Image (cartoon, rainbow, N blue to C red):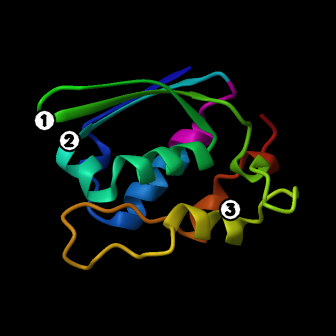
């Protein structure tokens, strides 16, 4: 399967809904599935490319290739883990939803005046968890 998410996340109205969109992409793809994520460079800069890469990796994606134009950033990713709960913690255990949510959101909340941000909430992480599904 392939999900092409080109200039969509940046049109979602709120930071939690943007995070949920990436969670849903991770849920829909099976291991080996492809995600093409295209965002305006100013949106990537607002969250930082490093932070976006970390969020994608925590959700089970491996970034295989990137490219950019003067205004747009492209990320080609493959889904590497069946579920985000398979991320090992520092103690070698599987991360709980609470730990994963904290890692996805980082230590600093986005400023209230940020023109683009993504945040993650426990509800969508638990609702769209592949560990609890049959596929």
Q: In the rendered image, which quarter contains the C terminus?
A: top right
Residue denoted by label 3 = 126
Residue 121 against residue 66 in the figure, above or below? below
Q: In the rendered image, which quarter contains the N terminus?
A: top right
Q: What element carries label 3?
A: helix
Residue name at image x 66 percent, y 63 percent = 100
* Neighbours of disc 3 within 10 Å: few (<14), some (14-19), many (20+): some
Q: Earlier in the sequence, mark 3 or mark 2?
A: 2
Residue 17 is marked as none
Circles 2 and 1: CB distance less than 8 Å? Answer: yes
Measured as percent of width and height from the top left, residue 32 is found at: 65, 21
Q: Which of marks 2 and 1 is nearer the N terminus?
A: 2
The span shown in magenta is: 25-31
- Name, please, the residue furthest toward the bottom: 112
Q: Which of marks 1 and 3 is nearer the N terminus?
A: 1
Q: What element carries label 1?
A: loop
Circles 3 and 2: CB distance less than 8 Å? Answer: no
- Quarter of the image holding residue 81? top right
Circles 1 and 3: CB distance less than 8 Å? Answer: no
Residue denoted by label 1 = 71
Residue name at image x 35 percent, y 65 percent = 15
Residue 104 against residue 27 in the figure, above or below? below
Q: Nearer the viewer, residue 93 or 90?
A: 90
Measured as percent of width and height from the top left, residue 113 is found at: 19, 76
Q: Which of marks 3 and 2 is in front?
A: 2
User: Whole-Å distance between the Cαs marked 3 and 2?
Assistant: 29 Å
Measured as percent of width and height from the top left, residue 6 is found at: 29, 32
Q: Is mark 2 on a helix, strand or loop?
A: strand
Residue denoted by label 2 = 40
């Amino acid at each position: 399967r392939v999900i092409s998410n080109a200039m969509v996340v940046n049109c979602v109205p709120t930071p939690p809904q943007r995070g949920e969109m990436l969670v849903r992409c991770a849920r829909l793809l099976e291991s080996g599935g492809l995600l093409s994520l295209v965002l305006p460079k100013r949106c990537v800069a607002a969250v930082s490319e490093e932070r976006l890469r970390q969020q994608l990796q925590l959700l089970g994606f491996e970034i295989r290739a990137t490219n950019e134009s003067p205004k747009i950033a492209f990320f080609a990713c493959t889904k590497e883990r069946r579920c985000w709960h398979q991320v090992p913690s520092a103690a070698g255990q599987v991360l709980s939803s609470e730990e994963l949510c904290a890692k996805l959101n980082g230590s600093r909340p986005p400023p209230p005046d940020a023109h683009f941000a993504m945040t993650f909430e426990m509800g969508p992480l638990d609702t769209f968890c592949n560990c609890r599904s049959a596929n």
